[in-house]
Image (spheres, rainbow, N blue to C red):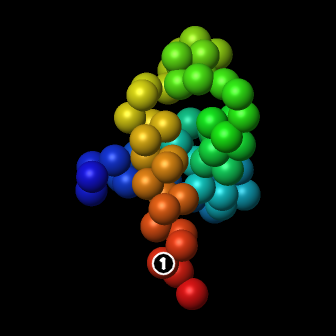
Amino acid sequence: MKDLINRITINPEICHGKAVIRGLRYPVDVMLELMASVMTTKELLSDYPDLEHEDFLACLLYASNLKDRR
């Protein structure tokens, strides 16, 4: 699981410091919204061919970790 979270990066030079997938300018919040919609992982991978299944799992893990922040 630790390897998954390393797929999420935060860099002030990329997307104004928002959490993104592997520095690729795909914001985690946008990917989470898409996953919460009716799109399947298969459809997302088709629409975003430079992303991998593990990237979407990393987004979910990142969101899960946010609940522990105060």
The answer to which quarter of the image holds residue 33 is top right
Q: Nearer the viewer, residue 50 or 69?
A: 69
Location of the C terminus by quadrant is bottom right
Residue at the image position 63 percent from the left and 36 percent from the top: 35
At label 1, the amino acid type is Asp
Residue at the image position 48 percent from the left and 78 percent from the top: 68
Where's residue 28, x and y in %?
Answer: 61, 48
Where's residue 6, x and y in %?
Answer: 36, 52
User: Is 43 placed above or below 29 here?
Assistant: above
Where's residue 18, x and y in %?
Answer: 66, 57
Residue farthest to the front, as pictured: 38
Direction from residue 58 to residue 23 in the image, left or right:
right
Residue farthest to the bottom, as pictured: 70
Residue farthest to the top, as pictured: 46
Residue at the image position 72 percent from the left and 57 percent from the top: 16
User: Is 2 placed above or below 45 here?
Assistant: below
Residue at the image position 43 percent from the left and 46 percent from the top: 58
Q: Which residue is mark 1?
A: 68
Where's residue 9, x and y in %?
Answer: 49, 53
